[in-house]
């Protein structure tokens, strides 16, 4: 059962060039539209919520880098998101450096703890990998919970400062903070995009599709997986760091397994193997949660859980994946239509 | 020394819950290839159901030990028919995700209905006291729970090794394709086996009800430890699930006694060591991964 892929093959031949191919002008139109949404988001949505969407979006992208492009479902990514949330918070409180530096420190911390976790986890694949990563993440949860003097235990880490080179507007106004935070997130997204569209990324995809063949071609499969795992952890750390700075708070929930589950939900909702889908999924889930909470509806987890069940049952390609497949089908149909 | 014996017995008692539940998890994985994330939630449902039956219908503990697993069996059958079935031919990760979503729904539903504080449950009469042998004193209920779990594990073991149904289930666990090739309809056993696994988790819940706090969250931590148990034991192995269940119970009890701050972490360190030395688990076979 290991040769079945979670990224279920579509009926559409993915090798066919689509309107989203490199030379297509549509590519730039979409890119510009995306940037416009990024810039205008805090005008439409309460800025801290807009910031949350970007953070969860990058977090989901970090999951997709593993799941969609390497074929590994990490169910313990809260360790890196939450680990960095705490590390970033501690750095910001103790040193008072500008927040991008603190976030960078958090991301490095996430990558450091990802090395032993990745080393042990990649010895297993598929469902085992998910369980092992989950268990290690839970180990970190207990450490964070126990180490009260540093992490505040159940009270969490409070009053994390938003230092930003002395620019008062960013430090006090969440609207301006959004743009500073978005800068950091954008860097993370670019890194993910570069990784996927690089020779390294091609090897990852090869490992996903056929590990035995990749190994036969001389690639050290385990090492590639560990490197992908560490990069993914770094991106999750970047996202978690910005998240904790934005909230001035890091709570135990950030390292808990529901966080690991929520980010997988966002990734699947957006579309596995699409990278951009993560941002769309994050937009839907975070906005929906905020909307339900402000409408005074209790039991949000029940709705999230039900959405999860329905997506897995009925909507496995996700929003972006479904849209992409529709576009591809259209293009292929048009191409195959006989010319007059 | 007497303290050590006491911790050992406590560990075996706690291990009983893990062993019975992990057994259910292993049987389900064996036949369906599904890692049931909602196993912890089902364990919680078992305990809540026992408490509600006692409060509303005055069903006592002994009756609950019989009734709750039957109800949970029905629940499992329903779950398999309505949800699990549709994803069986896909990657096992899909059912893992499905049962994760289901867990969120179940936990939140119980939280909404019964609140976050615990439900009361009395230790059944006759099991409330302490048994003292020499200088070792242990709650009678812990001894009962331990013995009961051992009996259940042995009974399930006998069922799997001595009966025709067990033979089919084991064959389907070990070589599903070959079993099918021999003309045995494995598909017919999928639903009842799933229900059976769920019933075992529910039974563990009833067993836990008198000695642990009954809350909506009681299964959340439990399921993670269960995963550690099956990783240690080897996911494909039924014996591994039982042995590792008791082993983890013991390690946890010694951890609580001798290094309280690290009690929970010790289990995962043990898991890490097992993965390093034997990635397939203590009793697992290499090819199942």
Image (tube, coloured by chain):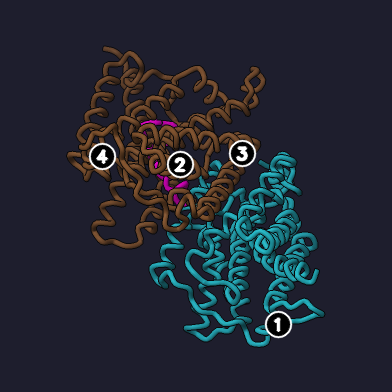
In which image quadrant can residue B77 be found? bottom right
On whether disc 2 and disc 1 are found on a single subunit, the reply is: no
- Rounded to the nearest whole Å, what is the CA distance between mark 4 and mark 3? 39 Å
For image coordinates 49% across by 53% down, the residue present is A149
Seen in the picture, residue A15 relative to A39 is either above or below; the reply is above
For the record, the magenta segment spans: A258-277
Task: Decide: is A338 above or below A304.
Answer: above
Residue receiving disc 1: B130
Res. A253 visible in picture: yes
Q: Which residue is mark 3?
A: A121
What residue is pinned by disc 4?
A: A171
Q: CA distance from mark 2 to mark 4?
A: 20 Å
Q: Are marks 2 and 3 in contact (CB under 8 Å)?
A: no
Q: SS for tag 1?
A: strand
Which tag, 2 or 3, sits closer to the chain's start?
Answer: 2
Label 2 resides on the chain identified as A
Q: Are marks 1 and 4 in contact (CB under 8 Å)?
A: no
Q: Which residue is mark 2?
A: A87
Q: Is residue B130 above or below residue A10?
A: below
Element type at marker 4? helix
Q: Position of A53 compared to B259: left or right?
A: left
Q: Are marks 3 and 1 on the same chain?
A: no
Nearer-N-terminus badge (4/3): 3
């Amino acid at each position: 059962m290991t040769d079945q892929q979670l990224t279920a093959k579509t009926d559409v031949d993915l090798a066919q060039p689509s309107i989203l191919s490199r030379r297509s002008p549509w590519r730039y139109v979409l890119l510009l539209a995306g940037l416009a949404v990024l810039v205008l988001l805090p005008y439409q949505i309460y800025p801290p919520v807009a910031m949350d969407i970007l953070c969860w979006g990058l977090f989901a992208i970090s999951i997709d880098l593993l799941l969609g492009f390497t074929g590994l479902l990490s169910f313990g990514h809260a360790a890196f998101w939450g680990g960095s949330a705490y590390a970033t918070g501690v750095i910001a409180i103790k040193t008072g450096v500008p927040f991008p530096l603190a976030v960078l420190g958090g991301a490095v911390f996430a990558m450091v703890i990802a090395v032993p976790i990745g080393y042990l986890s990649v010895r297993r694949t598929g469902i085992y990998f998910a369980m092992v990563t989950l268990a290690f993440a839970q180990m970190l949860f207990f450490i964070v919970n126990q180490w009260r003097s540093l992490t505040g235990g159940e009270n969490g880490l409070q009053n994390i400062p938003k230092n930003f080179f002395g620019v008062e507007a960013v430090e006090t106004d969440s609207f301006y903070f959004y743009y500073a935070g978005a800068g950091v997130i954008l860097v993370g997204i670019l890194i993910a995009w570069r990784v996927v569209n690089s020779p390294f990324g091609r090897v990852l995809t090869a490992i996903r599709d056929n590990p035995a063949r990749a190994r036969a071609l001389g690639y050290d499969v385990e090492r590639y997986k560990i490197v992908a795992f560490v990069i993914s952890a770094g991106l999750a750390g970047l996202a978690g760091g910005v998240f904790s700075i934005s909230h001035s708070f890091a709570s135990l929930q950030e390292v808990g397994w529901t966080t690991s589950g929520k980010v997988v939900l966002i990734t699947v909702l957006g579309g596995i193997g699409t990278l951009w889908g993560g941002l769309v999924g994050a937009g839907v889930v975070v906005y929906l949660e905020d909307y339900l909470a402000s409408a005074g509806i209790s039991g949000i987890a029940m709705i999230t859980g039900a959405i999860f069940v329905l997506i897995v049952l009925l909507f496995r390609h996700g929003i972006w994946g479904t849209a992409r497949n529709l576009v591809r089908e259209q293009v292929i149909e048009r191409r195959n239509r006989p010319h007059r | 020394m007497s303290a050590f014996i006491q911790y050992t017995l406590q560990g075996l008692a706690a291990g009983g819950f893990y062993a019975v539940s992990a057994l259910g998890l292993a049987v389900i994985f064996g036949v369906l290839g599904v890692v049931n994330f909602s196993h912890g939630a089902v364990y919680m449902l078992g305990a809540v159901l026992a408490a509600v039956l006692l409060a509303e219908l005055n069903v006592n503990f002994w009756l609950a030990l019989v009734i709750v697993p039957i109800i949970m069996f029905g629940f499992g059958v329903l779950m398999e028919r309505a949800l699990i079935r549709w994803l069986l031919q896909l990657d096992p990760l899909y059912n893992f995700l499905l049962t994760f979503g289901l867990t969120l729904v179940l936990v939140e539903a119980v939280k909404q209905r019964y609140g976050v504080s615990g439900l009361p449950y009395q230790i059944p009469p006759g099991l409330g006291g302490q048994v003292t042998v020499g200088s070792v004193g242990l709650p009678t209920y812990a001894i009962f729970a331990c013995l009961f779990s051992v009996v259940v594990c042995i009974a399930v073991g006998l069922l799997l090794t001595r009966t025709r149904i067990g033979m089919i289930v084991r064959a389907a666990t070990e070589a599903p394709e070959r079993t099918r090739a021999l003309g045995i309809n494995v598909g017919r056993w999928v639903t009842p086996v799933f229900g059976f696994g769920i019933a075992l988790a529910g039974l563990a819940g009833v067993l836990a009800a008198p000695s642990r706090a009954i809350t909506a969250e009681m299964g959340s931590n439990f399921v993670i430890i269960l995963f550690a148990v099956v990783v240690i034991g080897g996911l494909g192995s039924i014996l591994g699930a039982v042995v590792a269940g008791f082993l983890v119970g013991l390690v946890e009890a010694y951890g609580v006694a001798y290094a309280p701050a690290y009690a929970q972490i010790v289990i995962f360190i043990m898991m890490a060591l097992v993965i390093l030395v034997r990635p397939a688990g203590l009793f697992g076979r290499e090819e199942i991964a």
